[in-house]
Amino acid sequence: TQDGNKTDVCVVTVEQAPLSFIIEAEDLVTSGGTFADGNNSNMNTTAVGVNYVNNGDWATYNMTVPEDGEYKVIYYISCPAANGNIITYVNDVEITSDAIPDNNITDGTEWETYVAVEASVTTELSAGTYTFKIEAAGSDWQWNLDKIEFVKVGELSVIAVTGVTVSETASVESRQHRNPNSNSITC
């Protein structure tokens, strides 16, 4: 902008959101396991995810990876029990094994209060279609799962921004801060 003999330059940085994809827990293809709860012959699917998960229970999913790269894995999971653990596999090769912390909720919503838990390691995936598997390990009663998100790790993409015009309007003025000790304006 120009203000009399004063000129100011603003640098605008635009960061592209990282690539991610989600596997919804209720979209399982097959499931099986120990059935130690006596309530179901497999993981129970709900409108939100899966429940009645016990030690040794498992489910498979179709997974499409859009781009080659390193991905972090985030579980959206509720676990009101000690010693919960989730193991994940791609085409029967283990990629993560993580302890799931007790959410310490005791108000009756402990099985429906999902929190984001990031896997302890990232995993290298190639673009393509795979069989993805989750498995419960640890204590008898485990966790409920809403979804699993894969977020591509790496350098941020820089996007060129051109053709920006700044005019003096109320909204622009409100974002400018005049330094009374110098002839500069900070945007």
Image (cartoon, grey):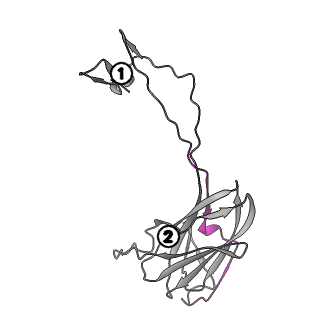
Q: Position of residue 106 (x, y in %)?
A: 34, 76
Please identify the residue farthest to the left as the structure is shown: 181
Assess disc 2: are there few (<14), some (14-19) or many (≥20) residues with their C-alpha within 10 Å of its C-alpha. Answer: many
Q: How many marks?
A: 2
Q: Position of residue 128 (x, y in %)?
A: 75, 59
Assess disc 1: are there few (<14), some (14-19) or many (≥20) residues with their C-alpha within 10 Å of its C-alpha. Answer: few
Q: Position of residue 44 (x, y in %)?
A: 59, 77
The image shows residue 174, relative to residue 151, as above or below, that is: above
Quick one: label 2 or label 1, which is nearer the N terminus?
2
The image shows residue 128, relative to residue 182, as above or below, that is: below
The residue closer to the viewer here, 156 or 112, is 156
Q: Name the residue located 45 percent from the left edge and 70 percent from the top edge.
A: 112
Q: Name the residue located 42 percent from the left edge and 17 percent from the top edge.
A: 1
Type of amino acid under label 1: Ala
Q: Name the residue located 63 percent from the left edge and 82 percent from the top edge.
A: 42
Please identify the residue farthest to the front as the structure is shown: 182
- Structural distance between the alpha carbons of marks 2 and 1: 45 Å
Type of amino acid under label 2: Ile
Indicate whether residue 15 is drawn in magenta. no
Q: Quadrant of the C terminus?
A: top left
The residue closer to the viewer here, 40 or 5, is 5
Q: Position of residue 169 (x, y in %)?
A: 39, 19
Query: In the drawing, what numbered circle is on residue 77?
Result: 2
The image shows residue 67, relative to residue 29, as above or below, that is: above
Indicate whether residue 26 is drawn in magenta. yes
Magenta part of the protein: which range? 16-37
The residue closer to the viewer here, 80 or 185, is 185
Query: In the drawing, what numbered circle is on residue 170?
Result: 1
Residue at disc 1, secondary structure: helix
